[in-house]
Image: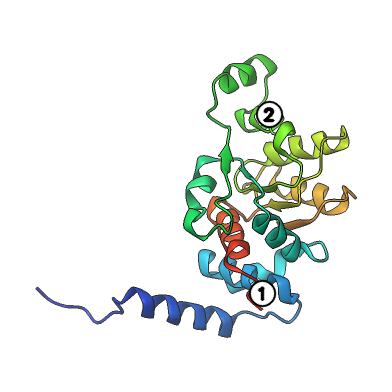
Amino acid sequence: MVRRNYLSDAAEIHRASRALARRETDLGGIPGDLVEVALRLVHASGMPEVIADLAFSPGAGDAGREALRAGATVLVDTEMVAHGVVREALPAANPVVCRLNAPGVAERAARQGITRAATAVESWRDALAGAVVAVGNAPTALYRLLELLEEGAPRPALVVAMPVGFVGAAEAKEALIEGGFDVAYIALRGRRGGSALAAATVNALAAGDGR
């Protein structure tokens, strides 16, 4: 067998990748409580330039970490986000909840003429207070969350807003950023996002302050 010359040690790959991500990423505008989040997003996407689109409320990183340490539930819009969250890293054995495939969700969505993701978010109302919410796929999930907040639903500790796509993703994130919802947020402006980036953000918050 021909052996190609490449790194094969997992620990060394991780170290080298982190070093390259830090060297190639402009962290000048990133507050200390979000440095680890920024580096994880670069690592997960392979795109240092993604940090230019990172938007956040003051103290959002600290808010997310404190909530996780206090045992906050992690509410996610898709199974892909749920599977991307490293359970062993969560500081308080935090529940990770995805209700997209819960009984009755598909039927209610069909009756109402809305997406399953938006329908699933409607069932979050009883779990929102103090939760860490991570939306990594569906703009309609983020829009429905904002509607719940406008209706007076309990405030989560943090909203990680990273839906992806060409229809509604950028607009839903701007609605959160500009809407004055009195909720901490970390968002990725524009069309880019995805389940891997939403999960990477939660994992960064679970890992510690990263300062």
Residue 205, given in percent of the width and then of the height, sits at 63, 63
Looking at the picture, does residue 139 appear above or below residue 55?
above
Residue under label 1, please give it: 35
Residue under label 2, please give it: 123
Furthest residue toward right: 180
Q: CA distance from mark 2 to mark 1?
A: 33 Å
Q: Quadrant of residue 110?
A: top right
- Residue 188 visible within the image: no
The N terminus sits in image quarter: bottom left
Relative depth, front residue between 88 and 198: 88
Residue 63, given in percent of the width and then of the height, sits at 75, 60
Q: Residues within 10 Å of mark 2 (few under 14, many from 20)?
A: some
User: What kind of residue is marked 1?
Assistant: Val
Residue 158, given in percent of the width and then of the height, sits at 74, 53
Tell me what residue is drawn at x 90 percent, y 50 percent: 180
The C terminus sits in image quarter: bottom right
At mark 1, the secondary structure is: helix
- State which tag comes first along the sequence, 2 or 1: 1
Q: Quadrant of residue 139?
A: top right
User: What kind of residue is marked 2?
Assistant: Ser
